[in-house]
Image (spheres, coloured by chain):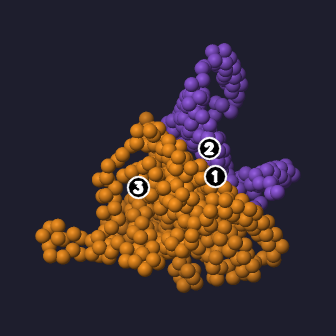
Chain colours: A purple, B orange
């Protein structure tokens, strides 16, 4: 991806992220967060991580934020928009953010990987294809396309089978709980 | 700057632009217009009426003696013109920015999802060389899909799920009771059925072992459609037994697709008898038309996805044994065109099915809709995933 696009999408993510905090209207904030997620998804896709990029949109922009918006719309927005700005919390928040940015800058500045570009670390498709056992992944790698979804699946189901089953059980319990909770009581 | 320009692959960009213009503007948009016409004609047939059969070439306007009716085929053009000429009225009590944004948010995601649907196998432009055209790009057949992503169905679900913002914002920004109720209904409806929709295609993906829609279509071209495994390597015992979960998947997928596109019998968000017109009550002129077109565009893409996943995409039935199958890099141009025609024919049949259902079934009640989604479709889809997994593991190859 050309560097221009990287800067475009980073700017998109950051500007809309800032608007989430600055805008007074909760609906506008929620929609800004959606745009910020879209920019973030574009950045993931630029790193060949198609799966994570698409899931970012599917889960966060498409489901979580819709629910947020749904709840915000049921609230009284005028009262929310008229709330006075608390000077102390603004200064405190800004200070925390600055400290975090300085920390991040110091750590990332000292990182060796930060000095490399994607062109410096090409993917060795042939070598990678030989190490894989599953035919679909092997074929994709031999054709020089990165099967990121399949690789994520392999990692999840072969390296962390216990953890993924635990997560699955947790989510299932959650789903059943929702169905039970939303059930009306019958006399 | 020079290196930046060199990094751009011009042939790729031109090919992509041509494909986008062809598929979205020359195929989907006219199809949207003519689905509305088909809707009116089919409903007329079902209700024993005539329907719009007059709008043709108005020769009488130019001093002719008689109009040419063309069975009303010009009706969509007249409708479009009407929408443009009507007053575009913005009520005073709406939240203007969101009110203007909402119709676009319905139409844009619907059109964006078209990018990953393979609408044909490939076009071989080698014959142009005989006519004296030169260039290296001639000898590489063009793949007929705008973006050949490895996450095809997920991309469609992700972008389609953004369509709900348009409806929600329309309902909320209209600042009026009925649209708001429509918006609230559509949010809960779309979120509920998204789960069944996503789970319903997991068995399909387990059988294909791939998320790339063009590879899925190629596989079905070679080994029989998922719902019609009657040729190639599809004639195994395993595939025939797996037909049962696939069929359940197909039913759940189609029902969820009806709910996601707000089509009858699940058109509760715009239910006329209860909500005037639901979320687009306050809209007029072209803004209303955008909601209308967005619904039909979503329906066409939904049909395209159903056709690609279950009915072989662009592949011709019994294509491989008849010699009409796709061979990578060696498909003649006439076969490529035939594949496009085959895809479009299947999508048209599916749309007629959509229309037929709308004029046959009565609308669900809202609590019935939610109950069906959460207590039947969701569990059925989950059980189907487990059934398919068990069958794949235990059945001999």
**Looking at the image, do the residues carrying marks 1 and 2 touch, with CB atoms under 8 Å apart?**
yes
Mark 3 and mark 1 on one chain: yes
Q: Chain of mark 1?
A: B
Quadrant for the C terminus of chain A in the image: bottom right
Q: Chain of mark 3?
A: B
Question: SS class of the residue under badge 1?
Answer: helix
Single out the residue that lies furthest toward the bottom. Answer: B322
> What residue does disc 2 label?
A70
Residue drawn at x 69%, y 82% as measured from the top left: B235
Q: Is residue A125 visible?
A: no
Pick the front one: A30 or B218 = A30
Residue A62 screen position, x and y as percent: 61, 48
Residue drawn at x 69%, y 25% as measured from the top left: A104
Question: SS class of the residue under badge 2?
Answer: helix
Question: SS class of the residue under badge 3?
Answer: helix
> What residue does disc 1 label?
B188
Residue drawn at x 75%, y 81% as measured from the top left: B237
For residue A127, which numbered disc appears in the image? none
For residue B289, which numbered disc appears in the image? 3
What distance separates the C-alpha of mark 2 from that of mark 3?
Answer: 25 Å
Quadrant for the N terminus of chain A in the image: top right
Q: Chain of mark 2?
A: A
Pick the front one: B52 or A137 = B52
Question: B288 left or right of A112?
Answer: left
Residue B157 screen position, x and y as percent: 60, 55
**Looking at the image, do the residues carrying marks 3 and 1 touch, with CB atoms under 8 Å apart?**
no
Residue B53 screen position, x and y as percent: 33, 74
């Amino acid at each position: 991806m050309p560097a221009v696009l990287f800067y475009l999408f980073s700017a998109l993510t950051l500007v809309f992220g800032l608007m989430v905090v600055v805008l007074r209207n909760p609906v506008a904030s929620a929609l800004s967060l959606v745009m910020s997620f879209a920019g973030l998804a574009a950045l993931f896709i630029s790193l060949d991580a198609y799966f994570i990029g698409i899931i970012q949109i599917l889960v966060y922009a498409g489901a979580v934020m819709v629910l947020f918006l749904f709840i915000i719309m049921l609230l009284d927005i005028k009262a929310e928009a008229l709330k006075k700005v608390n000077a102390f919390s603004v200064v405190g928040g800004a200070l925390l953010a600055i400290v975090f940015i300085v920390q991040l800058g110091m750590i990332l500045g000292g990182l060796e990987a930060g000095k490399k570009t994607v062109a410096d670390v090409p993917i060795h498709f042939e070598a990678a294809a030989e190490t894989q056992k599953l035919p679909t992944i092997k074929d994709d790698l031999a054709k020089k396309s990165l099967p990121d979804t399949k690789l994520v699946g392999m990692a999840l189901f072969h390296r962390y089978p216990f953890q993924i089953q635990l997560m699955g059980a947790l989510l299932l319990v959650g789903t059943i709980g929702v169905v039970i909770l939303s059930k009306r009581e019958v006399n | 700057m020079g290196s930046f320009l060199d990094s751009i692959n011009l042939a790729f960009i031109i090919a992509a632009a041509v494909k986008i213009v062809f598929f979205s503007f020359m195929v989907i948009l006219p199809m949207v217009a003519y689905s509305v016409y088909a809707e009116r004609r089919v409903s007329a047939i079902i209700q024993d009426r005539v329907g719009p059969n007059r709008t043709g070439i108005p020769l009488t306007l130019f001093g002719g003696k008689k109009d040419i009716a063309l069975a009303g085929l010009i009706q969509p053009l007249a409708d479009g013109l009407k929408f443009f000429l009507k007053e575009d009225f913005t009520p005073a009590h709406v939240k203007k920015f969101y009110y203007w944004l909402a119709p676009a948010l319905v139409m844009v995601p619907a059109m964006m999802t078209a990018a990953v649907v393979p609408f044909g196998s490939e076009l071989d432009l080698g014959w142009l060389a005989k006519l004296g055209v030169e260039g290296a790009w001639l000898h590489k057949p063009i793949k007929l899909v705008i973006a050949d992503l490895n996450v095809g169905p997920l991309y469609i679900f992700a972008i389609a799920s953004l369509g709900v913002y348009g409806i929600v914002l329309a309902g909320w920004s209209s600042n009026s009771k009925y649209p708001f109720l429509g918006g609230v209904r559509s949010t809960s409806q779309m979120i509920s059925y998204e789960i069944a929709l996503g789970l319903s295609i997991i068995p399909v993906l387990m059988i294909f072992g791939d998320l790339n829609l063009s590879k899925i279509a190629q596989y079905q071209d070679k080994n029989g459609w998922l719902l019609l495994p009657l040729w190639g390597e599809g004639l195994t015992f395993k595939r025939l037994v797996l037909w049962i979960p696939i069929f359940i998947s197909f039913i759940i997928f189609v029902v969820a697709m009806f709910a996601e596109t707000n089509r009858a019998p699940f058109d509760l968000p715009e239910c006329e008898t209860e909500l005037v017109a639901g979320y687009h009550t306050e809209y007029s002129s072209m803004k209303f038309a955008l909601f209308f077109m967005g619904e039909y565009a979503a329906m066409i893409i939904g049909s395209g996805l159903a056709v690609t996943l279950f009915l072989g995409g662009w592949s011709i039935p019994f294509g491989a044994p008849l010699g009409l199958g796709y061979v990578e890099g060696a498909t003649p141009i006439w076969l490529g065109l035939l594949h496009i025609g085959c895809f479009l024919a299947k999508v048209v049949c599916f749309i007629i099915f959509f229309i037929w259902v709308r004029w046959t079934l009565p609308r669900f009640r809202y609590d019935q809709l939610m109950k069906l989604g959460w207590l039947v479709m969701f569990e059925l889809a989950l059980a189907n995933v487990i059934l398919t997994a068990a069958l794949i593991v235990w059945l001999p190859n």
